[in-house]
Structures are given as structure tokens and as C-alpha cells.
Image: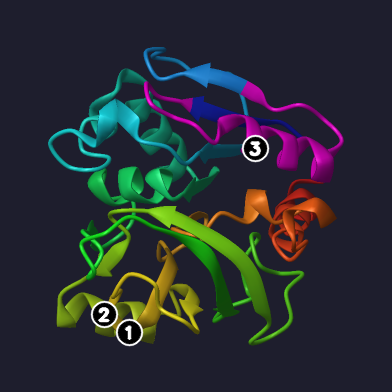
Amino acid sequence: MQAAVIVFPGSNRERDAAKALERAMGKKPLIVWHGDSTLPKVDLIVLPGGFSYGDYLRTGAMAAHSPIMREVVARAKKGVRVWGICNGFQILCETELLPGILLRNASLKFVCRPVTLRVENNDSDFTRLCKPAQEIKTIVAHGDGNYFAEPDVLKKLEDNRQIAFRYLDNPNGSINDIAGVFNKERNVLGHMPHPEDSVEPLHGSTDGAVLFESVARALG
């Protein structure tokens, strides 16, 4: 059982993600630089939060063309689990591993505050330890978290049960309160909130731990 965390110029949540993974799995993840073109054999790839390339051009757009992403895309298409958090979600949308796009927050302001999510689908390796409609308290910290997809794409997401989480207190204007989505095969997950910052009592919530424990159980 081995995880890897991909680090881009401007990533700032890779240590949080790595510590949460180690806590759940009992093993340190590999830290992989974006400029590498190969990946060792891993069971889970995590794209952490931050501001890759300073969010120039579009959030995630430049990172999507980093050398390592060719391998990430190839592994995802072979069934390897890929998890994008915040900026990682944006990157997954830019690579088209996930549908939709992340726009500026409706307020046009950076939002950093606690939010409550509802689990929409617990039939995945990332959410299987969650209860149906479980509420998870965690945080968001982003300026471009406003999820948007065209009506036909939204219908497919709903029909295929690809919506992973919804906000109960939408902080950014995301369409249909969508906080995170799966690909059709559900081996790729992306969402804006930061569960890695809700795994210890000092964080104010330990609700995010269930996601790390779910994927650890699946990999074990």
C-alpha cells in the first residue's frame, strides 16, 4: 500500500495531506516533484491544495501541463485512485479527468471559513466508511472554487451518481451546491474543501479523517 503526493510550484498543503495519509495508512507517502516524468508503482495519487504556478493564466491550467501529469492521467485511466483537493481538483478538471470547471467565487473574494458538506455517494473507495447523507465539517480556502458545468454534463453527473459532496452552506456559488465530483468509474475524486485540515481535535473537527480512513481501508 503506497500513496504519492504530487508537489507543484506554489503547493502549500502537501505536508498536511502527507501527514493525514500517514496517520490513516501507517506509512509515509512518497513526495513527487511536478517536473518528474515517471512515477513509481503507487496505489493512490494525491494532488494537494495550494496555488500552483501562482494561479497564473487559470487555476490549475499550467499545472495540468506539468510533466508528471501525463503519468497521472495514464495511471488514472488504468484505474489507479487519484484524489485532488482544492487546487488539485482544479488541476483534475483542467486535465479533463473530471468534468466541469472551477470559476471565481461568486463574491469575487477569497473565502476561508468552516463549511458543512453532505456525502452524496458513499459507494466509492474514498467515501465507503461514510454513512449515507453524513455531514462533514471541514474548511475551505480558495478564490476560485465556484464549480460550474453545462446542463447536459450536470445531468450525467446526477444520473451516474458522480456527485460526491454538496455544500449545506455554499461558500462560493457552486452550481447545485456541488463541492466535489467523481469520474464515471469513481477512481478519481476532486473537491474544494480540505479534509486534511479536519483530522485532529486541534483542528476543531476530526470529520475529515473518515475519507482518509476509507481510502486506507480500500488500499489495505
Coordinates of residue 206 in the picture (x, y in percent) = 78, 61
Residue 66 seen: yes
Residue 176's label in the rendered image is 1
Coordinates of residue 55 in the picture (x, y in percent) = 24, 36
Q: Please tell me which residue lies in front, 31 or 39.
A: 31
Determine the CA span between mark 2 and mark 1: 9 Å
Above or below, 81 against 71 in this view is: below
Residue 18 location, quadrant = top right
**Which residue lies at the image location 28% right of the left edge and 66% below the top edge?**
146
Question: Which residue type does callout 3 highlight?
Answer: Asp
Residue 107 location, quadrant = bottom left
The stretch of residues the image draws in magenta is 7-30
| Left or right side of 73 for 211 | right
- Residue contact between numbered discs 2 and 3, judged by CB atoms under 8 Å: no
**Which residue lies at the image location 32% right of the left edge and 43% below the top edge?**
91
| Structural crowding at the residue carrying mark 3, measured as other residues with C-alpha within 10 Å and reported as few (<14), some (14–19) or many (≥20) | some
Coordinates of residue 23 in the picture (x, y in percent) = 82, 41
Above or below, 133 against 79 in this view is: below
The residue that disc 3 covers is 16
Residue 200 seen: no
Q: Of helix, strand and loop, which one carries label 2?
A: helix
Question: Which residue type does callout 2 highlight?
Answer: Leu
| Left or right side of 65 for 25 | right
| Structural crowding at the residue carrying mark 1, measured as other residues with C-alpha within 10 Å and reported as few (<14), some (14–19) or many (≥20) | few
The residue that disc 2 covers is 154
**Which residue lies at the image location 71% right of the left edge and 69% below the top edge?**
128
Q: Of helix, strand and loop, which one carries label 1?
A: helix
Determine the CA span between mark 2 and mark 3: 31 Å
3 or 1: tag closer to the N-terminus: 3
| Left or right side of 140 for 30 | right
Outermost residue, right direction?
26
